[in-house]
Image: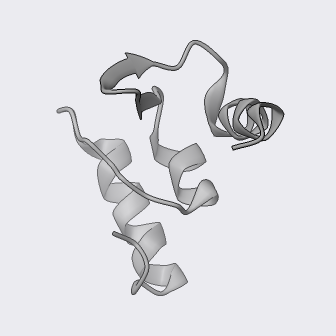
Amino acid sequence: PTNHLDMDSIDALTSALEQFKGGVVIVSHDERFIKAVCNEIWVCEGGSLKKFQGEGIKEYKESILAKGI
């Protein structure tokens, strides 16, 4: 969670994740952080896990708002 990190710490974590060659599961509400480090979005919904087929966190957020969630 990035809740308790200051901006410098989030920037350092972002930089480290950009250099990391492995896979990471990130759960965050920080749109800026997600946009910076995630190249895929997976959605847990209705008892299943599916890859979001849109283009990034902004489009995912728009799809949720369109559903009225």
- In the rendered image, residue 33, in percent from the top left (x then y), is placed at 53, 57
Residue 10: quarter of image: bottom left
Residue depicted at 44% across the width and 58% down the height: 28
- In the rendered image, residue 60, in percent from the top left (x then y), is placed at 66, 32
Q: Is residue 10 left or right of residue 24?
A: right
Q: Quadrant of the C terminus?
A: top right
Q: Is residue 69 above or below residue 40?
A: below
Q: Is residue 62 left or right of residue 37?
A: right
Q: Is residue 31 above or below residue 53?
A: below
Q: Quadrant of the N terminus?
A: bottom left
Label count reads 0
Q: Is residue 16 left or right of residue 58?
A: left
Question: Residue 66 versus residue 55: which sits nearer the camera?
Answer: 66
- In the picture as drawn, the residue positioned furthest to the top comes out as 53
- In the rendered image, residue 65, in percent from the top left (x then y), is placed at 78, 41
- In the rendered image, residue 9, in percent from the top left (x then y), is placed at 40, 79
Residue 68: quarter of image: top right
Residue depicted at 23% across the width and 40% down the height: 24
Residue 2: quarter of image: bottom left
Q: Is residue 36 left or right of residue 2?
A: right
Question: Residue 51 versus residue 17: which sits nearer the camera?
Answer: 51
Looking at the picture, the colour scheme in use is one colour
Residue depicted at 73% across the width and 29% down the height: 63
